[in-house]
């Protein structure tokens, strides 16, 4: 076994039947993904004429709505002495610094006045800008584009390469809810926890039956199978990879209602920190869109929106589903908090065969991205070919009692 332990994660895909064990060092100094869109706040959290401060990628960001209801975002720092503008006054059009009273237009970032200037002094305040950031409202969130840190103040926000991500919906009528969790771990560890297929019965215990039902997590040979193995197909995407599976619908009444004999699940990981899962069964669908926003190098925020069009008539269905997912969220938050305690001693970490292959791919993609960035060339996904991965479907019977 010792010969099978290595000090880094290889790019090449290995055969699913391999029993090799890989290790990787903690990414305490892992770089952050700048020049990407991140969820900054829920749209419902910011009313017209209000603003709030948040931290994203160790950058203080001021997010708000002007008098007309338009969302805006800017770096939360006055260019004069660096005091956070969020401590100042906001009239729906301009924000005024609490320290020396400098005023800035929230949509352009342009300085509108410096109270300490004496008569006849002309400092050309219109040439001074508080750095604004591009923002868009999509799917119940205000997204902010976080550019690479720069030592100089830019007059205009860096133009993103494309729009903010969109959550896929498959019908006009649906219900949805949002959840947010603040976790005491890095963005890397938070994201890989979302793609981990084997922690369910140990972390979620008595609630695990619900996730297995919703996500079609069951052995390929059925619940009573002696060999409790599962296979999933994985294919590369330009900036990540996709997991897919098709499962037969065993309940006759649901086959009749949905108009389908099978249900399909497709889950995408896409840089920097997003996970989109879509479950389709005929006319019915469920979509979950989870993102991780690094706050600092050791803390993160996870935002999830779940939408569905099945059983919309069911009383209190959305409230019940939201409560169950909140329980899952809390259980994940607690285990990540416990993991953070162990990571303080910087242990060497292991990635075991197919069950941890997604984790290894995540780190390989990140290393390849930053290597390409440093070399000034286009990023090339190290996940090259479609592959089947296989792991055992763990359940409550695996818990030591």
Image (tube, rainbow, N blue to C red):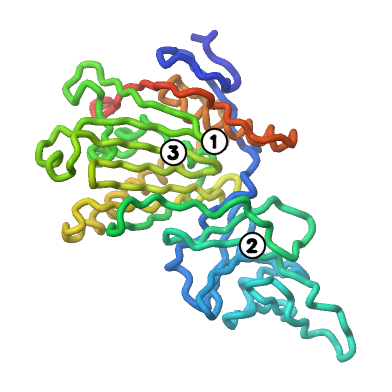
In this orientation, which residue lies closer to the viewer: 186 or 367? 367
Give SS at disc 1. Answer: loop
Side of 359 relative to 253 (left or right): right
Measure how far apart labels 1 and 3 are at the Cα level.
11 Å
Residue depicted at 64% across the width and 34% down the height: 379
Q: Is residue 24 above or below residue 67?
A: above
Q: Which residue has dot 1 on it? A: 238
Measure how far apart labels 1 and 2 are at the Cα level.
26 Å
Which of the 4 image quadrants contains residue 354?
top left
Q: Residues at badges 3 and 2 in contact (C-beta under 8 Å)?
A: no
Badge 2 local density, few (<14 within 10 Å), some, or many (20+)? Answer: many
**N-terminal label among 1 and 2:** 2
Residue depicted at 12% across the width and 41% down the height: 256
Q: Residues at badges 1 and 2 in contact (C-beta under 8 Å)?
A: no
Report if residue 326 is visible in the image: no
Badge 3 local density, few (<14 within 10 Å), some, or many (20+)? Answer: many
Which of the 4 image quadrants contains residue 97?
bottom right
Q: Which residue has dot 3 on it? A: 268
Give SS at disc 2. Answer: strand
Give SS at disc 3. Answer: strand
Residue depicted at 38% across the width and 53% down the height: 305
Question: Looking at the figure, which quarter contains the C terminus?
Answer: top left
Q: At which x and y percent is residue 277? A: 37, 42
Side of 389 relative to 279 (left or right): right
Side of 349 relative to 170 (left or right): right
Q: Which residue has dot 2 on it? A: 133
Report if residue 82 is visible in the image: yes
Q: At which x and y percent is residue 86? A: 61, 71
Q: Is residue 313 above or below residue 232?
A: below
């Amino acid at each position: 076994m010792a010969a099978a332990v290595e000090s880094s994660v290889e790019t090449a895909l290995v055969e699913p039947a391999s029993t090799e064990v890989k290790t990787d060092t903690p990414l305490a100094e892992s770089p952050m993904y700048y020049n990407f869109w991140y969820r900054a706040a829920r749209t419902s959290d910011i009313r017209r004429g209000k603003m709030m401060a948040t931290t994203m990628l160790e950058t203080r960001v001021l997010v708000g709505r002007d008098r007309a209801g338009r969302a805006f975002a800017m770096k939360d720092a006055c260019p004069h002495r660096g005091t956070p503008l969020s401590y100042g006054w906001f009239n729906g059009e301009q924000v005024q610094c609490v320290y020396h009273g400098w005023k800035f237009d929230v949509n352009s970032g342009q300085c509108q006045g410096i109270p300490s200037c004496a008569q006849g002094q002309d400092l050309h305040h219109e040439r001074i800008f508080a750095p604004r950031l591009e923002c868009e409202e999509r799917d119940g969130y205000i997204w902010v584009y976080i550019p690479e840190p720069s030592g100089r103040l830019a007059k205009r926000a860096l133009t993103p390469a494309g729009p903010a991500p969109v959550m896929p919906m498959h019908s006009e009528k649906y219900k949805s809810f949002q959840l947010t969790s603040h976790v005491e771990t890095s963005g890397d560890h938070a994201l890989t926890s979302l793609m981990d297929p084997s922690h369910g019965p140990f972390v979620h215990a008595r609630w695990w039956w619900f996730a297995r039902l919703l996500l079609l997590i069951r052995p390929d040979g059925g619940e009573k199978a002696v060999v409790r193995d599962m296979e999933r197909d994985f294919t590369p995407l330009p900036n990540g990879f996709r997991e897919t599976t098709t499962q037969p619908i065993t309940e006759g009444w649901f086959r009749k209602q949905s108009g389908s004999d099978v249900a399909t699940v497709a889950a995408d990981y896409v840089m920097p920190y997003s996970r989109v899962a879509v479950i389709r069964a005929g006319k019915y669908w469920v979509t979950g869109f989870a993102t991780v926003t690094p706050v600092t190098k050791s803390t993160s925020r996870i935002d999830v929106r779940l939408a569905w069009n099945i059983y919309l008539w069911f009383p209190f269905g959305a409230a019940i589903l939201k409560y169950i997912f909140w329980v899952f969220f809390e259980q994940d938050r607690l285990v990540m908090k416990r993991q953070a305690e162990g990571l303080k001693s910087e242990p060497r970490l292991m990635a075991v065969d197919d069950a941890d292959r997604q984790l290894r791919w995540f780190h390989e993609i990140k290393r390849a991205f930053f290597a390409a960035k440093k070399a000034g060339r286009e990023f090339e996904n190290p996940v090259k070919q479609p592959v089947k991965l296989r792991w055992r479907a763990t359940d409550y019977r695996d818990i030591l009692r």
